[in-house]
Image (cartoon, rainbow, N blue to C red):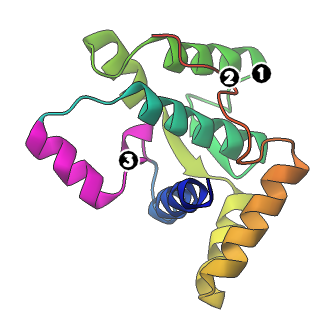
Amino acid sequence: MILLVMNIIEAYMDFLSLCEFDVYTLFYFWNDKRFDYWRISGTEYGKEWCQDALDLAYRMIKTGFMGIDYPNSDPTPEEMKKIFHDFAAFSPNVIDGAVIWSTYQFYLAEKGEAFVHDWKRSGDNAVFERKLVEMFDAHGIGFDKQGFVPVTF
C-alpha cells in the first residue's frame, strides 16, 4: 500500500510540475517511462490508469489546486459534474472517449501555483508529500479512498 501511494504521489508531483507553465490533458498523467513503454507496445489506457487519472482530477479540483480551461469562465458545478461523468463513461481508447479525454485541459489555480512554487523553492519532496497527503485527508479525499467518480466503461 505504501509503495502504491508513493507511486501515485510521484505521478501527482510530475503532473503538477508539468502544469506549472501550461495547460494539459489527463493524458499527461503518466510518467515518461511508462508512457514510452505504452507508446512502443501499443498498450491501451487501462481502466485502472483511467480511474487514477480521474481521481487526480477530482482531488485537484476539490482542493482548488487546478481548474479546467473552459470557454469564457470556469465550469458551473453542473457542468463539472457532466465533465467528470463523461470522463468516467467513455474510454480514451475509442474515438468518442479520446475526444473527451483530450478536450478538457487542466491548469494550476493560484492555490496550486503557490503550492508548486513553495515545493520547488524548498527542494524538499518529503515536505511536499506530507502536505499533499494532509490536505487531501482534511478534504476527505485522501489516498485511502478512490473512485470518487467511478469509471464505468
Q: Which residue is mark 1?
A: 77
Structural distance between the alpha carbons of marks 2 and 3:
20 Å
Disc 3 is placed on an element classified as: helix
Q: Give the residue type at disc 3.
A: Tyr
- x and y percentages locating residue 129 in the rendered image: 67, 69
Residue 84: image quadrant is: top right
Q: Is residue 144 above or below residue 10?
A: above
Residue shown at the point (67%, 34%) measured from the top left: 146
Residue shown at the point (56%, 31%) measured from the top left: 70
Structural distance between the alpha carbons of marks 3 and 1:
24 Å
Residue 118 at least partly seen: no
Residue shown at the point (44%, 39%) measured from the top left: 26
Q: Give the residue type at disc 2.
A: Met
Crowd tier of the residue under label 2, counting other residues whose Cα lies within 10 Å: few below 14, some 14–19, many 20 or above: some
**For discs 3 and 1, the disc positioned in front in the rendered view:** 3
- x and y percentages locating residue 43 in the rendered image: 19, 33
Q: Give the residue type at disc 1.
A: Pro
